[in-house]
Structure formats: structure tokens, C-alpha cells
Image (cartoon, rainbow, N blue to C red):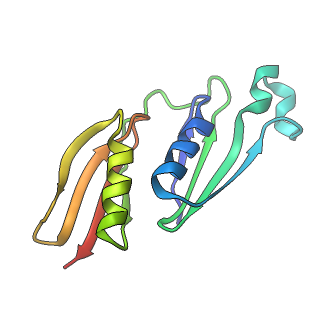
Amino acid sequence: MQPNLLFNGNAEDVLNFYRDAFGGELNVMRFAGSPVAEGLPEEWGSKVLYGTLNSPFGTLNAMDAPPGRGPKSTEGNIMISVLAKSEADIDKAFAKLAAGGEVMMPLGETFWAKRFGMVADKFGTRWMISYGMQ
């Protein structure tokens, strides 16, 4: 399974933000030129119909929902879990996700991991990041 995040017009900003935090390659398909573009306002042509970030941490998808079909809120019952391969990876990713967001649990040692933390990024997506699972 791969997480797919739904946004109201800023999916490209979100995907670039996550690429900065996690690294990797970004592939974006836009509404312009697609069959679904016919029923949308012209300014939606540049929005993300479907975007994929293939990073060393895994794959994450994001898209812009056409007007009236997007989420009412980004808060819900989902947290994306990331398993880092090194302390440097977890520190970098956590710091970038926390910039402009809210640290829910600072990075620290737990009984199940050498380092674990939870953060809600500036787009409202919540993350659990772990390294060195016991």
C-alpha cells in the first residue's frame, strides 16, 4: 500500500516540501491535457492530477482535488510512519517536517526505538518517524 494525500490546490508545494525532507525523484501529471480537465476551471490545468515522490524512505502520492471535491480538513485519523536508515536521516527529515509545523513528540529514545518522534507538518500531515527499532 502507498499513502495518497489529497489537497485543495497546493499538492505541488506539498510534494516539493516532502522531496526536500526525504530526497528522491518527483513525477507529476497535471490536469491540463487530461480528459478530466474539460470540466474544470482553466486555472486548474497546472494543478496536480497525480504526483508521486519516490524517495529512499518509500513512495508517497499526492493530488489536488478539483473544487468542491477536496478535503474539508487535513486533520484525521492517519499518521504516516517512516523508518529511517540512520540517525542523520531521521534528524534531517524530522527537522524539515517540523519547520513551520508542530512537534507532537520530540525525537528521543523510547523502549521500542533508539529514536522516535511525531510531528504535524505545515500542511497538516502527521508523521511518526523511527530509527533503530528494538
Would you say 66 lies left or right of 126 here? right
Q: Quadrant of the C terminus?
A: bottom left
Hey, which residue is sitting farthest bottom in the picture?
A: 134
- Residue in the picture at 69% in, 39% down: 48
Q: Is residue 113 above or below residue 69?
A: below
- Residue in the picture at 68% in, 29% down: 66
Would you say 29 lies left or right of 132 here? right
Q: Nearer the viewer, residue 70 or 80?
A: 80
Would you say 117 lies left or right of 83 here? left
| Residue 6: % across, % down | 55, 40
Hey, which residue is sitting farthest left in the picture?
A: 111
Instruction: Report which quarter residue 99 is drawn in.
Output: top left
| Residue 71: % across, % down | 51, 32
| Residue 36: % across, % down | 82, 36
- Residue in the picture at 69% in, 47% down: 50
| Residue 76: % across, % down | 36, 40
Q: Is residue 41 visible?
A: no
Instruction: Report which quarter residue 54 is drawn in.
Output: bottom right
- Residue in the picture at 23% in, 55% down: 117
